[in-house]
Amino acid sequence: MKGKKLLKKIVLVLTLLIIGFISFLLYQTKDDINADLTNIEEKLNSYYNSTKMGGFAVSVFNADSIIYSKGFGYANKQDKKPYTTNTQQYIASISKTTIGIALMKAEELKLLTIDDPINKHLPFKIYNPNFPQDEITIKQLATHTSSLDYNELVVESLYIEETEKKKTLNSFMSDYFKHNKYGTVKFTKFKPGTDWNYSNIGASLAAYIIEIVSGTSFSDFTQTNIFNPLKLNNTYWTESESDSLIHTNYYEPSGDSITNVQTSGVILYPSRDMITNIKDLTKYCQAIISRNNNLLKPDSFNKLLSPQLNSSITNLEDDSNGIFFMIDRNNYGITYQLTGMSGGDNCIQTMMWFDSKTELGYIFLGNTGFSKLNRSNHNLVYNALVSLGYNYTMDNSSIGKKIQLKWHNVYNRVRALF
């Protein structure tokens, strides 16, 4: 009798645990936005706040088609000039993804290998003085584990004239690393390859190595090997090349308003200064998702986008890094593990991420800086894009595909909690 009572209690507890777990899964996979093609514009308009944001464009797409793309707000608020899908702007650190692709192309051309020590190619030597016997590699530059310390004051103070960009990397790198023109080169206390430390200087050093091994400027190398093959006809490295009539103004949030501010190119332009519009950037990301052979070979794409770091890396803010592509979840409240890059400063906010499993991509380009004043607006917009992509795919998939997608959704949302 006692055994039966105990068994009943055990069954009851297990039943309650199962019910609780199922309820937990249902709650975690709940889509609070429920965006679809009939309501997405209304939702995005409701998340746009004209006192905190100037203008932006969005795109939701898969490998071969665009699900939704549209501009909102203003490229020039004073003149009431709308921000459209043709509007051009700086995309900040998303620019770094081109360094990754350029490195893979240079490897295909047998100009370098990603595991080469940087000193194999540089005209001067760079070592972390705390670890003089340990070579820094190109891969470490590409995964932000080189131990080069980030120097925001140096990087952001070196704004330059547009005409100087093609010759700037050589002069800066020599001045910075060889002649110590900007003071002692800063390194972290960690051994190369063991600590994640984001660095625009390290990223642009990788671009400089591409210039050395190819004998051409980084801008020309990317034009020949990325922009031209993909027919990115609205993508540039200098504002003078872009169309002034459709290049946006830039804004900084301040209190209950936004202020028109000026911005220009920086000396380390490969890390920040790519100029494009939502149409070209969507085409670019689709080529990456589809692994377009006009861009790279399959093995190069595998290396570019696969995790290059392990759990032993300290201070790793993301799940992992590819080659100048981040692999992360919980970006902007998105629980999926997405691959891509974000960028921004006081007057720019950009996001380009895709799900390698579903081949769904999401892009946001905005002409206003990301701050605590508009963070919720940006997050809601991006969550709406992901909601639209998920629901569109669910509505247009076979039963088998729907089950796979639903499981992918459950798995990612639960995994994001741990």
Image: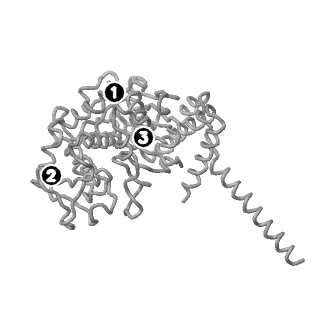
Residue 234 vertical position relative to residue 306 in the rendered view, above or below: above
For label 1, the SS is: loop
**Label 2 environment density (alpha carbons within 10 Å; few <14, some 14–19, many ≥20):** some
Residue 348: name its quadrant.
top left
Residue name at image x 47 percent, y 33 percent: 63
Q: Position of residue 116 (x, y in %)?
A: 23, 53
Q: What residue type is disc 3 on?
A: Met
Looking at the image, is mark 3 or mark 1 earlier in the sequence?
1
Q: Which mark is residue 176?
A: 2
For label 3, the SS is: strand
Q: Which residue of the protein is positioned furthest toward the top in this rendering?
A: 245
Q: Which residue of the protein is positioned furthest toward the left in this rendering?
A: 179
Residue 281: name its quadrant.
top left
| Residue to which mark 3 is pinned | 351
Residue name at image x 62 percent, y 36 percent: 394
Q: What residue type is disc 1 on?
A: Leu
Q: What residue type is disc 2 on?
A: Tyr
Which quadrant of the rendered structure holds the N terminus?
bottom right
Q: Which mark is residue 24?
A: none
**Viewer-nearest residue: 54 or 296:** 296
Residue name at image x 26 percent, y 53 percent: 115
**Label 1 environment density (alpha carbons within 10 Å; few <14, some 14–19, many ≥20):** some
Left or right of 212, for residue 293:
right
Which quadrant of the rendered structure holds the C terminus?
bottom right
For label 2, the SS is: helix
Q: Which mark is residue 232?
A: 1
Looking at the image, is mark 3 or mark 2 earlier in the sequence?
2
Q: Position of residue 176 (x, y in %)?
A: 15, 52
Numbered disc in front, either 3 or 1: 1
